[in-house]
């Protein structure tokens, strides 16, 4: 069975490679900071499952301290000039799209087909982790295709990965760190406290008030937690189920579906949803950290109002 | 109530623009301490959660492939292709991408997009190229706005598409939350009730993209007729 550890090993090797390249990069004034940061990330991927919780905690703490106190820098990218790119783009034509498109195609094949393959009664791919495993297979396939097509030197993909990783920098760690924060929130019972506050302080004695409190609460709580999945069970248990479904007799399916989508409106408006709202800022080299959130906010607010209206009119259809 | 201290740290830290990684780690520490855990216990809990969520960072594996393709001119090629389309505008490119992304997500093909895989190497350069073709060289501010809209298009389309797919995580979460409270709803029902919002998201985004194109035309005509600003 192909497990997720195989993909983690792959990621570990890539980050180890980045650490070596960073250490040897004389153009970067903070090269040892970069090298240490990527080496720690590599360690997490390679041996994270064996070193115990406290060691993992110290590892992430060290990474946060390096990044948080300006330990990361940027070197000169080792890449081609615009003229060279124009020339090779003219030479290669649309074949250039093939490696990049191989990733999603193979990922889909993995998730749809390989995930169902059984060999001697055992699944080929760990059924709990099909997405990251399929992505790993997609990347391997794309690399093979890219080497056949572009004939780069062996180290070129790593140099290019370093160039892109240095523009993303510490933000690369943020989604995973936020996910870990979410777990700590759950351990500490943050959701229950917020749910209790909402029901205690808000006047929820009409249908309309209950619907508003639920949809807006979903959006707000999602903005705090960074994803709607963490907010939904809390808000549904605090407001959706007892009031909208219980007291006012609303349809549970409508409450659930539209409640979750109200949470998604919150996701569009929070820096806590780093992989959607902050990572693209780094990848697209935008100067304003909130540029993506600003572009999304009008849609998010309109949709939140629409969701509130939809739930009010659709949930009580009987 | 003390439990919410961590959220205060989070909001305050983001507001005064400290490094977000530092803010998040501090929020975790404060939350854990406020809940009565020892510093060592919080560190271990945070480390355990970090380790269990490594799959979140697996997406960075695409960078060697994307970077290599960029090195050989992928973005240049994407621009050239769009340059040949007479009717292309930045808004229209993003409208087409929105439709494709939302429909594919609705049938469960969520990995057909994403910021490192699609938006940076293909969609953003295409939208920029379309804007340039129509209006000539664009000022940096306008380029930045087009790129931000490209990222926003991917997010909005996938959020309000994937929830229609019956096997998507959020549908299963809703179902399990309801059933643990003794209520039954079929995934099909839940996904059907996601369709009105998906339709509205589509309509709102299309209108915003039309307005975006118009604003671009207006700004660029004004820019042409007024002399360049001097510092």
Image: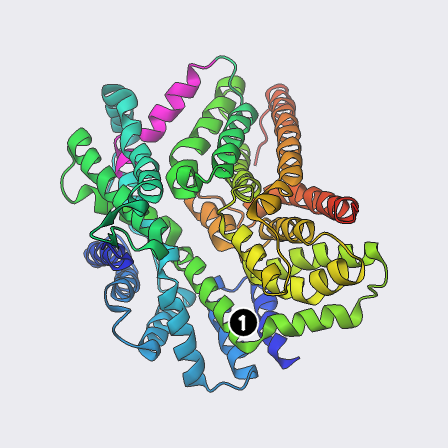
Was residue B72 drawn as part of the magenta stretch in this picture? yes
Image quarter for residue A303?
A: top right
Which residue: 27% across, 45% down? A117
Which of these two is toward me, B120 or B50? Answer: B50
Residue A280 in view (yes/no):
yes
Bounds of the magenta segment: B68-85
Whether residue A200 is situated above or below residue A11 in the rendered picture: below
Residue A77 in view (yes/no):
no
Q: Is residue A182 left or right of residue A204?
A: left
Which of these two is toward me, A249 or B19? Answer: A249
Where residue A196 sits: x, y (%)? 70, 73
Q: Residue furthest right?
A: A206
Which residue: 20% across, 34% down? A145
Where residue B3 sits: x, y (%)? 60, 78
Was residue B20 drawn as part of the magenta stretch in this picture? no
- Mainly helix, strand or loop, the magenta region? helix
Q: Is residue B163 left or right of residue A138?
A: right
Where residue A233 sits: x, y (%)? 60, 63
Image quarter for residue A30?
A: bottom left
Whether residue A153 is situated above or below residue A94 in the rendered picture: below
Q: What is the secondary structure assignment of the residue under circle 1?
A: helix
Which residue: 30% across, 77% down? A52
Query: What residue sits right under mark 1 in the picture?
Result: A185
């Amino acid at each position: 069975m192909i497990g997720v550890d195989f993909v983690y090993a792959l990621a570990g090797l890539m980050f180890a490679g980045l650490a070596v390249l960073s250490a040897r990069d004389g153009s970067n004034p903070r090269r040892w900071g970069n090298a240490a940061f990527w080496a720690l990330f590599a360690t997490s991927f390679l041996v994270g499952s064996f070193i115990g919780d406290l060691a993992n905690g110290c590892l992430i703490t060290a990474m946060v301290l390096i990044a948080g106190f300006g330990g990361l820098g940027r070197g000169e990218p080792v890449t081609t000039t615009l003229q060279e790119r124009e020339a090779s783009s003219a030479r290669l034509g649309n074949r250039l799209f093939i490696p990049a498109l191989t990733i999603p195609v193979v990922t889909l094949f993995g998730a749809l087909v390989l995930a169902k393959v059984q060999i001697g009664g055992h699944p080929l791919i760990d059924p709990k982790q099909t997405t990251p495993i399929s992505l790993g297979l997609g990347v391997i396939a794309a690399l093979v295709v890219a080497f056949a097509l572009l004939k780069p030197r062996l180290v070129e993909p790593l140099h290019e990965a370093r160039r892109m990783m240095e523009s993303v920098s510490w933000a690369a760690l943020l989604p995973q760190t936020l996910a870990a924060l979410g777990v700590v929130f759950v351990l500490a019972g943050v959701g229950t406290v917020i749910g209790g506050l909402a029901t205690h302080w808000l006047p929820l004695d009409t249908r309309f008030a209950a619907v508003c409190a639920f949809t807006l609460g979903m959006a707000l709580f999602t903005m705090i937690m960074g994803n709607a999945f963490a907010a939904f069970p809390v808000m549904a248990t605090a407001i959706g189920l007892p009031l909208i479904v219980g007291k006012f007799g609303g349809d549970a399916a409508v409450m659930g579906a539209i409640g979750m989508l109200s949470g998604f409106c919150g996701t569009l408006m929070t820096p806590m949803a780093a992989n959607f709202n902050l990572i693209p800022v780094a990848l697209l080299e935008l100067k304003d950290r909130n540029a993506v959130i600003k572009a999304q906010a009008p849609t998010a607010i309109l949709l939140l109002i629409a969701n509130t209206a939809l739930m009010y009119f659709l949930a009580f259809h009987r | 109530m003390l439990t919410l201290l961590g959220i205060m740290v989070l909001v305050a830290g983001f507001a005064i623009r400290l490094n977000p990684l530092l803010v998040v780690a501090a929020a975790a520490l404060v939350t854990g301490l406020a809940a009565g855990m020892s510093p060592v216990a919080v560190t271990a809990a945070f480390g355990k959660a970090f380790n269990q969520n490594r799959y979140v960072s697996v997406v960075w594996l695409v960078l060697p492939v994307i970077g290599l393709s960029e090195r050989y001119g992928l973005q240049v090629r994407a621009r050239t292709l769009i340059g040949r389309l007479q009717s292309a505008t930045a808004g229209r490119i993003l409208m087409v991408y929105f439709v494709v992304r939302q429909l594919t997500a609705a049938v469960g093909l969520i990995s057909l997009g994403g910021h490192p895989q699609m938006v940076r190497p293909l969609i953003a350069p295409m939208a920029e190229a379309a804007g340039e073709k129509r209006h000539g060289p664009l000022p940096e501010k306008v380029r930045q706005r087009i790129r931000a809209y490209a990222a926003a298009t991917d997010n909005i389309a996938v959020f309000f598409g994937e929830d229609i797919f019956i096997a998507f995580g959020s549908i299963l979460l809703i179902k399990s939350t309801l059933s643990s409270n003794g209520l039954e709803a079929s995934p099909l029902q839940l996904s059907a009730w996601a369709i009105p919002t998906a339709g509205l998201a589509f309509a709102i985004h299309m209108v915003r993209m039309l307005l975006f194109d118009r604003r671009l035309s207006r700004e660029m005509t004004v820019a042409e007729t007024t002399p360049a600003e001097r510092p």
